[in-house]
Image (cartoon, rainbow, N blue to C red):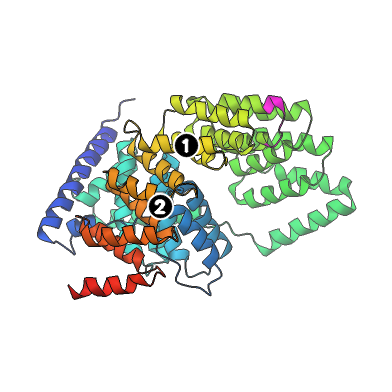
């Protein structure tokens, strides 16, 4: 049914996006700070800084996540920043990891990633107000809301419009404060790990032990637990699936099939799918294939596609190929199928993945194809990726990703990277090449960075080059920096 209020919110969001852009331009002209325009005018941090807490337990994970982010491997970076928060909740990196995971998801740009990113920024605001990325987080949150609003998210549209001063503020400060608090609580619940009570944990450990001693007594109890549908029992049901998964019997398979079809939680159903994928029975295959073909639950379909790929049989492979070429399955599901096909390292599967590129309908799917082929180790795939980077008809985001993947290969000489830098007009692509040069232990790379620092027309680019030179061990750099200072 036509909802005039919904359209008003969307219209307000479009106007808000224009106001934000105008505020940014005006603020930059006036040097405004401390106002709404000043907030919007702040630069958005796009590259994570080097690790700074060497003794921190999360230091290694942060370095790996940072490297992936700065290489443009946003899905990998998001997963690694999430792992850092999950495994080392007391790490000094956690507050900033929330921002960088949100930024990676913003760059990936799916609706789910954008909403998750907004939730992560809300948690940072609540629990890590002193994080070094807090100022950038406000700017990133506004950009995410703008993206969501343009795609029809009414709540994001309303929030953006209120932030920009377009919608009337007569609803009252208290009402808005209450709404904001509800949003914060909701985000906290979604992002933070669910906590189990000691009593529940003890019960599950006891059930696990009982299953080892007396399967006939334990399985009915576990089966009864899996019939629960309340949100509070999600963790219990997950553990019950894990416990039952140790028993590869027709009885436990029947229980797993029921969980796959009827449990309301996609995570629980996804775990059941993984266990069913180990079964060679026809019933298990048909149940998994049915989920892939007909389910509307995207998260469950992703898990099921991943599970089926483990079977490595002809039918599962054929189904992976069907999913990989059908955009109607959902771009994330399609991307998972592409990844699993390429991971097999089978030349025929790699060729199939490369052929899919021409018909890919989204930047995300194209980027996943590029990433999957970059991992193949084949010289022909590396050459093909470089061709995508140099093709002016490709979307600029795709070209950036392809460029980073191509020039990171050892076969690409520094002289080729230098030539690319001089030929490529796009500023962000040049920034990526700067990082690639900085990672090369080669005097020619240092020469180019010094040339950029000395002569590039962009002050921002020159500053970046100087920063990267400061990390170099080349003895010439210190003299060069002194010369710059003395000018």
The residue at 69%/58% (across/down) is 200
User: Is residue 117 depicted above or below 349 in this figure?
Assistant: below
Where, by quadrant of the figure, is residue 219 drawn? top right
Q: Disc 2 designates what residue? A: 414
Q: CA distance from mark 2 to mark 1?
A: 16 Å
The kind of secondary structure element at disc 2 is: helix
The residue at 74%/61% (across/down) is 202
The residue at 31%/49% (across/down) is 430
Where, by quadrant of the figure, is residue 248 drawn? top right
The crowd level at tag 2 (other Cα within 10 Å; few <14, some 14-19, many 20+) is many
- Numbered range of the magenta stretch: 310-316
Q: Which sits in the foreground, 85 or 370?
A: 370
User: Is residue 291 depicted above or below 463 in this figure?
Assistant: above
Relative to 416, 308 lies left or right: right
User: Is residue 283 depicted above or below 136 in this figure?
Assistant: above
Q: Disc 1 designates what residue? A: 383
Visible residue check, residue 460: yes
The stretch drawn in magenta includes residue 312: yes
The kind of secondary structure element at disc 1 is: helix
Image coordinates of residue 386 in percent, x first then y, are: 42, 38
């Amino acid at each position: 049914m036509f909802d005039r209020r919904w359209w008003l919110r969307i219209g307000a969001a479009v106007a808000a996006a224009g106001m934000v852009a105008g505020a940014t331009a005006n603020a930059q002209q006036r040097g405004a700070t401390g106002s709404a325009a000043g907030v919007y005018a702040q630069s958005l941090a796009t590259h994570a800084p080097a690790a700074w807490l060497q003794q921190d337990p999360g230091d290694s994970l942060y370095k790996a996540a940072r490297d992936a982010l700065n290489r443009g491997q946003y899905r990998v970076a998001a997963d690694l920043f999430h792992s850092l928060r999950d495994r080392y909740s007391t790490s000094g990196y956690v507050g900033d990891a929330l921002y960088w995971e949100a930024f990676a998801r913003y760059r990936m740009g799916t609706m789910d990633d954008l909403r998750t990113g907004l939730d992560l920024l809300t948690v940072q605001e609540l629990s890590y107000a002193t994080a070094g990325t807090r100022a950038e987080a406000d700017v990133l949150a506004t950009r995410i809301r703008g993206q969501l609003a343009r795609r029809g998210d009414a709540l994001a549209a309303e929030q953006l419009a209120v932030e920009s001063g377009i919608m009337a503020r007569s609803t009252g400060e208290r009402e808005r404060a209450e709404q904001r608090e509800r949003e914060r609580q909701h985000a906290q619940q979604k992002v933070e790990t669910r906590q189990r009570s000691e009593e529940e944990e003890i019960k599950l450990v006891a059930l696990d032990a009982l299953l080892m001693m007396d399967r006939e007594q334990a399985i009915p109890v576990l089966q009864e637990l899996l019939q629960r549908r309340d949100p509070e029992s999600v963790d219990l049901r997950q553990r019950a699936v894990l416990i039952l998964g140790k028993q590869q019997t027709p009885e436990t398979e029947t229980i797993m099939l029921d969980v796959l079809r009827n449990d309301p939680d996609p995570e629980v159903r996804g775990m059941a799918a993984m266990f069913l994928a180990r079964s060679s029975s026809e019933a298990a295959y048909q149940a998994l294939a049915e989920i892939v073909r007909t389910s509307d639950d995207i998260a469950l379909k992703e898990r099921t596609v991943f599970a089926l790929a483990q079977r490595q049989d002809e039918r599962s492979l054929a189904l992976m190929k069907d999913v990989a070429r059908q955009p109607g399955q959902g771009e994330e599901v399609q991307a998972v199928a592409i990844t699993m096909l390429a991971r097999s390292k089978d030349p025929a599967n790699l060729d199939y993945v490369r052929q899919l590129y021409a018909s890919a309908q989204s930047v995300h799917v194209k980027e996943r194809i590029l990433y999957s082929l970059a991992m193949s180790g084949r010289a022909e795939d590396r050459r093909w990726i470089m061709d995508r980077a140099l093709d002016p008809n490709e979307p600029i985001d795709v070209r950036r990703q392809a460029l980073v993947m191509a020039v990171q290969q050892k076969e690409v000489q520094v002289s080729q990277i230098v030539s690319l830098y001089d030929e490529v007009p796009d500023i962000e692509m040049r920034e990526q090449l700067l990082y690639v040069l900085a990672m090369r232990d080669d005097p020619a790379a240092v020469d180019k960075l010094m040339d950029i620092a000395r002569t590039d027309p962009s002050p921002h680019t020159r500053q970046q080059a100087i920063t990267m030179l400061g990390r170099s061990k080349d003895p010439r750099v210190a003299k060069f920096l002194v010369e710059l200072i003395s000018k």
